[in-house]
Structures are given as C-alpha cells and as structure tokens.
Amino acid sequence: MSNADKNRQLILDYFAAWSAGDVEKGESYYSDDFVSYQAGHSHMAGVFHGKQELHDRWIAPLIKMTDGRWHVSAAPDILLAGDDGIVVIVHETMEREGKGKITTDKLVVYTIRDDKITTCRMYDGDQGAIDDFWS
C-alpha cells in the first residue's frame, strides 16, 4: 500500500470517528505537535497549537453552542491524496439556538506524518455565513 493510500484510509477512519460522535477517538489522530488553522473572523477562527488547545477553544465550544447538534459526514470528498497529506471537502451540519441550522462544505487540507495528522487547515465554503452563525 502506498503512503497516499494509507493517508486516504487514515482520513476515512478519522471521519468515521467524528461522524459517530466519538470526540476522543477523533482527537487521537492528531500528532503531539499538531497545529490547526480555522479561517474566518469569528471567535471560532484562529490558530490552535496542540490537540488540547483545539479541544478547549474550538471543539468543546462548538459542541456546547450547538448542544451536540453538530454532524460531520463520514464520507468526505477526497480531492487529492499524496504521500504527506490529503485534501478533502467535508460536509457538516450544525444547529444553534437563535441561529437555526447551517450546512457547510468545508475545504480541509491535512498534513500527515507517521500516521498522525500534523496540520489541519479549514476553509468554509461560505465563510461569511459561518462567521455570522458563530456571532
């Protein structure tokens, strides 16, 4: 199996965990030096150093604000799989009191090393709508 094929399977397993709502398993795919970048201008945007910071500043607040009504598709559209990373379109649906329901197709670029995700760069298809959803 090539590295590109391994990365494709890793990402499919990663999204299966998130789709099942298994936060702990989803977070287990991150390397110790993991860095995540979330585009936008809301309080949910920014750079997150380490899986704990991503959890504390992005994942936990997202789950709390949506009251658990955040769904990540288990089948991202894989645009490109290479030896050191993968590019996907992720389908997410979120619902929040006072904001209603929003669906987004998010472009995500992952760098992978030693079977762990080392960087994640997230770009929502309609960034303005997502920023408004979090305001």
Image (cartoon, rainbow, N blue to C red):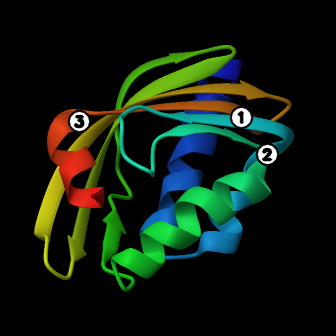
Residue to which mark 2 is pinned: 50
> Reading the chain from its start, which is encountered first: label 2 or label 3?
2
Identify the residue at image location x=56%, y=42%: 11
Look at the numbered disc 3 and give the secondary structure of its residue. Answer: helix
> Reading the chain from its start, which is encountered first: label 3 or label 1?
1
Q: Would you place residue 122 above or below residue 68 in this image?
A: above
The image quadrant of residue 55 is bottom right
**CB within 8 Å, label 2 to label 3:** no
**CB within 8 Å, label 2 to label 1:** yes
Q: Work out whether residue 20 can be spotted.
A: no
Look at the numbered disc 2 and give the secondary structure of its residue. Answer: loop
Number of marks: 3
Q: Viewer-proximal residue, 42 or 51?
A: 42
Q: Work out whether residue 50 can be spotted.
A: yes
> Which amino acid type is marked by label 2?
Gly
Q: Viewer-proximal residue, 14 or 49?
A: 49
Residue to which mark 3 is pinned: 127
Query: Mark 3, mark 1: which one is toward the viewer?
Result: 3
Q: Would you place residue 70 above or below residue 6 in this image?
A: below
